[in-house]
Amino acid sequence: MHRRLFLALPGALYAAPSVDVAAIDRGRILKAADGYLKEKPVTVTASSSPRSAGGKHDFFSEGDYWWPDPKDPKAPYVQRDGMTNPENFVAHRQAMMRLSVQVPALVAAYKITGKKKYAEHAAVHLRAWFVDEATKMNPHLLYAQAISGRFTGRGIGVIDTLHLVEVARAAGFLKNVDVRPWFAEYLTWMTTHKYGKDERDAKNNHGTCWTMQVAEFARYTGNASLMALCRERFKTLHVPGQIAPDGSFPLELRRTKPYGYSLFNLDAMAGIAQILSTDSDNLWTFTTADGRGMGKAMAYMAPFIADKKKWTLAPDVMYFDEWPVRHSSLLFAGLALDKPEYIAIWRGLRADPTVEETIRNYPLRQPVLWV
């Protein structure tokens, strides 16, 4: 692998890639983008649920693992950890995932070809979601991860907008639309409302995903102070609080989906490092006094990604067979830590899963926008 030059750009460390990601992904990008040119925007205003306490423009979702009480169907829902209730309202989440799949693919196609048709269609979706008064989403998550009979919304619901991270990244490549005002307003809500603060203070992947979102939205909107806050949280909270000395994520391993949650948290950690690293503050090489850091976390999970048969814990209660996919953490770490073996693993994995639950927990799908 050739050595890389590091180009210092505002708020990020970009490695001139030693692999041609655009060449590797060109076929899949263009095939997807050409299909998406025919797709019209679908926003939160296209569907609603009678269980939502919000209005037409308010995002609504329900807690995944909450079910009707078998003893009393009219009672508040009860929890079954790891078991998704198929009767929950998911239309808004599906619409946002659709946005997060289509817009980055369109912008990736624009980036590698220069053809304006891709940028123009991406802008149609962005305006519908974040600009047009008739169809846009309100910049808050007051009604996400609701639980029937218990809560109209929860801070834990902030993780639902993780799918806007790559949308924001994609929007930064476009000159024909500006959705920074929406993201700036959402940032204010995320960092000041109780729900946002509750999610910020979560110890596990929810806290990681709060930081990843704030980091990218702050980068897109030019909020240097919030970017600095996220760097500090990564070094003082996420790394020492979530990465064990052996590189594992104990809080994720305790769950009923330890393999999937570990991969998910690793990708979120890697996303933070990719967004926020600079040549004077490289989060990829940051370690605690006892050696915890991204290098240790990657070294722990990489063998289980390369060969899932080596996983020694119990399999996830659902969707275990759907993992792994082409995790961005492998590519980012391979470049940043000079680990060609990670890039080799990345190249051999599925890039475009079709199972909804897998797509939901795989938020960065267009690495050409990131390296």
Image (cartoon, helix red, strand yellow):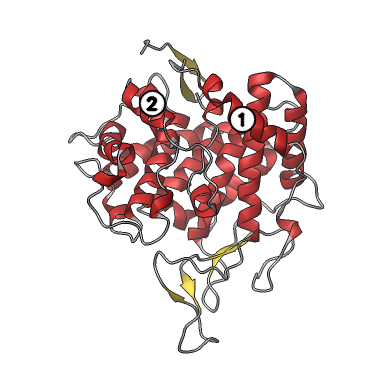
Answer with left or right where residue 145 lies relative to residue 57. Answer: left
Q: Residue 354 appears at what percent x and percent y?
A: 55, 47
Q: Residue 325 appears at what percent x and percent y?
A: 44, 41
Residue 171 visible, this angle? no
* Residue 29: mark in rendering: 1
Q: Amino acid at mark 1?
A: Ile
Q: Residue 117 appears at what percent x and percent y?
A: 77, 27
Residue at 73%, 29% in the rendered image: 118
Quadrant where the N terminus is found in the figure: top left
Residue at 49%, 89% in the rendered image: 72
Residue 141 visible, this angle? yes
User: Is disc 2 placed on a helix, strand or loop?
Assistant: helix
- From what the image shows, is residue 307 above or below residue 120? below
Q: Nearer the viewer, residue 22 or 90?
A: 22
User: Is disc 1 placed on a helix, strand or loop?
Assistant: helix
Q: Local crowd at mark 1 within 10 Å, few (<14), some, or many (≥20)?
A: many
Q: Quadrant of residue 233?
A: top left
Q: Nearer the viewer, residue 340 or 201?
A: 340
Q: Which residue is mark 2?
A: 343
Q: Quadrant of residue 368?
A: top right
Q: Amino acid at mark 2?
A: Ile
- From what the image shows, is residue 166 above or below residue 163? above
Q: CA distance from mark 1 to mark 2?
A: 19 Å
Residue at 27%, 46% in the rendered image: 309
